[in-house]
Amino acid sequence: MIIEALSSVDSFDPVSGQVNATNVKHSQVLDILSIESDTWSAQFDLKEAETLSVEKDWINANDVVYWSNVVADEVFFDADFTLQRPENARVINIIGTFMWDQYLKDPQSPVHALVYRKPIDYVIRPWFNLNSFSDSIPGIPELKEVKKTGLWGFSFLICC
């Protein structure tokens, strides 16, 4: 589950509309990886990180990112997602809160903290489930219009 999605460029989401760019900083000192954004920070211990094997299910994997209004983006990863061997790092600490905290058993102690050493390219199909909702739901007709008239009707490539 992705509990926070941040962009280094201005973007648009189906809940907030225009979203300003966020600064995300990564640093590593010895075996400690630190990640810091405008809203949260975390540290991970890489020294004893377990290197994971990539299972067949991951090769066919895609992910769905749900927004708080149930509109969702579909994400398709490139081969680097499965060819790299991710490391399951130990969480030292996480400071901050996330939109989905109320639904997580312990948001400060995730089961997995996967670390990829190289960038992963992926394609997003924004708001792929939008047409399945009735126009009688508040906000849905406006989102459908935005998707039809803007670049939001297309998938786009993002490199993280």
Image: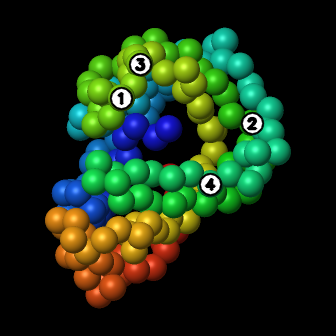
Residues at marks 2 and 1, CA–CA distance in whole angstroms: 29 Å
* Horizontal side of residue 32 vs 132, given as left or right: right
Please, what secondary structure does the residue beneath circle 2 have? loop
The residue carrying mark 4 is: 62
Residue 98, image quadrant? top left
Residues at marks 1 and 3, CA–CA distance in whole angstroms: 7 Å
What is the x, y in percent for residue 122?
Answer: 57, 60
Q: Give the label on residue 105, or none.
A: 3
Image height check: is 69 above or below 123? above
Q: Give the label on residue 103, or none.
A: 1
What is the x, y in percent for residue 29?
Answer: 50, 20
Q: Give the label on residue 157, or none.
A: none
Q: Amino acid at mark 4?
A: Asn
At x 64%, y 13%, the residue is 47
Image height check: is 127 above or below 46? below
Q: Nearer the viewer, mark 2 or mark 3?
A: 3
Number of other residues with Cα within 10 Å of mark 1, as a class: few under 14, some 14 to 19, many 20 or more: few
Sequence-first tag of 2 and 3: 2
Q: Nearer the viewer, mark 1 or mark 4?
A: 1
What is the x, y in percent for residue 85?
Answer: 75, 36
The residue carrying mark 2 is: 85
Residues at marks 2 and 4, CA–CA distance in whole angstroms: 17 Å
Sequence-first tag of 2 and 4: 4
What is the x, y in percent for residue 142?
Answer: 20, 75
Please, what secondary structure does the residue beneath circle 3 have? loop
